[in-house]
Image (cartoon, rainbow, N blue to C red):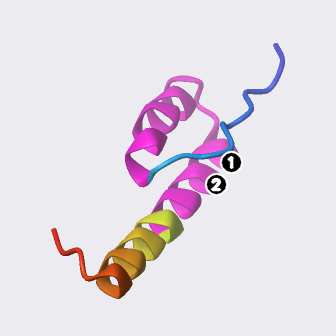
Amino acid sequence: MSEYKEPMMMCSEDYDELIDMALAMKNKEWFEELVKKQKRLREIEIEMRRELGVLD
């Protein structure tokens, strides 16, 4: 099986499906990597919203 390649541009919510896929495949390393990327991306999204003056 070829390894899944992530799209170039993703938002933090896009990682949910990949995380589910990693869990289904019981791929702990990929799961941990995805969770780490998602967490960092959420932090960046929040920071950018604050800088742009757009609050949720």
Picture layout, residue 2 above or below residue 22: above
Residue 29 is tagged as 1
- Mark 2 closeness class: few <14, some 14–19, many ≥20 residues within 10 Å: few
Residue shown at 44% from the left, 31% from the top: 17
Measure the C-alpha gap from mark 2 to mark 1: 6 Å
* Quadrant where the image shows the N terminus: top right
Q: Which x, y percent locates residue 7?
A: 66, 37
Within the image, what quadrant is residue 27 found in?
Answer: top right
Q: Dots 2 and 1: beta carbons under 8 Å?
A: yes
Residue 33 is tagged as 2
Q: Residue furthest left?
A: 56
Picture layout, residue 49 above or below residue 20: below
Q: Nearer the viewer, residue 55 or 2?
A: 55
Residue shown at 53% from the left, 46% from the top: 10
Q: Amino acid at mark 1?
A: Glu
Residue shown at 45% from the left, 40% from the top: 14
Q: Residue furthest top?
A: 1
Please, what is the dominant secondary structure of the magenta stretch? helix
Q: Residue furthest right?
A: 2
- With 5 as the anchor, is 33 left or right in this view? left
* Quadrant where the image shows the C terminus: bottom left
Q: Nearer the viewer, mark 2 or mark 1?
A: 2
Q: Amino acid at mark 2?
A: Glu
- Mark 1 closeness class: few <14, some 14–19, many ≥20 residues within 10 Å: few
The verdict on residue 36 being magenta is yes
Tell me which segment is drawn in magenta: 12-39
Q: Secondary structure at mark 1?
A: helix
Q: Which x, y percent locates residue 49?
A: 32, 75
Q: Which x, y percent locates residue 33?
A: 64, 54
Q: Nearer the viewer, residue 51 or 43?
A: 51
Q: Which x, y percent locates residue 39?
A: 46, 65
- With 12 as the anchor, is 6 left or right in this view? right
